[in-house]
Image (spheres, rainbow, N blue to C red):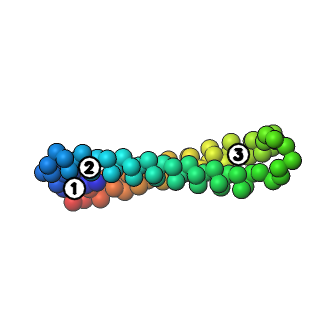
Amino acid sequence: MDKSMLADLDTLPEEDKIRMSTMIDQLQIRDSLRMYNSLVERCFNDCVDTFKHKSLQKQEETCVRRCAEKFLKHSMRVGLRFAELNQGAATQD
């Protein structure tokens, strides 16, 4: 959000600020769940080959761990890059 949008939020009545805050919280929760579900689906599809055993085999467990680490590192890097670009755009205004 840029500074003008934040300033616009300050002019809202308190009831609307609360409503906007609730909506933002819900969107963040939805996005977190979507990212988590995407991580689980991707790593499961890439790493689990058979259903012969009740628990993950050693190689499957290692694959899932590595997959999750890569996914989270990638997500963090994208988030940082997005923040850098956002900050650069804000300073150019």
Q: Secondary structure at mark 3?
A: helix
Asked whether disc 2 touches disc 3, contact meaning CB atoms under 8 Å apart, the reply is no
Q: Earlier in the sequence, mark 3 or mark 1?
A: 1
Q: Quadrant of residue 92?
A: bottom left
Q: How many angstroms separate mark 2 from mark 3 (CA)? A: 39 Å
Judged from the image, the secondary structure of the residue bearing numbered disc 2 is helix
The residue that mark 1 highlights is 5
Query: Which residue corresponds to mark 2?
Result: 19
Left or right: 74 with respect to 19?
Answer: right
**Closer to us: 26 or 76:** 26
Q: Residue, x 20% and y 50% (percent of image)? A: 16
Q: Quadrant of the C terminus?
A: bottom left
Secondary structure beneath dot 1 equals helix
For the point 87% across and 47% down, the residue is: 52
Crowding at label 1, few (<14), some or many (≥20) Cα neighbours within 10 Å?
A: few
Q: Earlier in the sequence, mark 2 or mark 1?
A: 1
Residue 33 position in % (x across, y down): 51, 49
Q: Residue at x 39, y 52 (%)?
A: 27
Amino acid type, label 3: Val
Q: Residues within 10 Å of mark 3 (few under 14, many from 20)?
A: many
Question: Mark 2–mark 1 contact, CB under 8 Å?
Answer: no
Residue 59: x percent and y percent? Answer: 80, 43
Tag 3 near tag 1, CB within 8 Å: no
User: Which of the 4 image quarters holds residue 8?
Assistant: bottom left
Callout 2 amino acid? Arg
Q: Residue at x 19, y 47 (%)?
A: 15
Query: Badge 2, how many Cα within 10 Å: few under 14, some, many 20+?
Result: few
Specify whether 49 is left or right of 3: right
Kindly identify the amino acid type of the residue bearing the numbered disc 1.
Met
Q: Which residue is mark 3?
A: 64
Mark 2 or mark 3, which is nearer to you? 2
How far apart are the two marked residues, 3 and 1, measured between alpha carbons? 41 Å
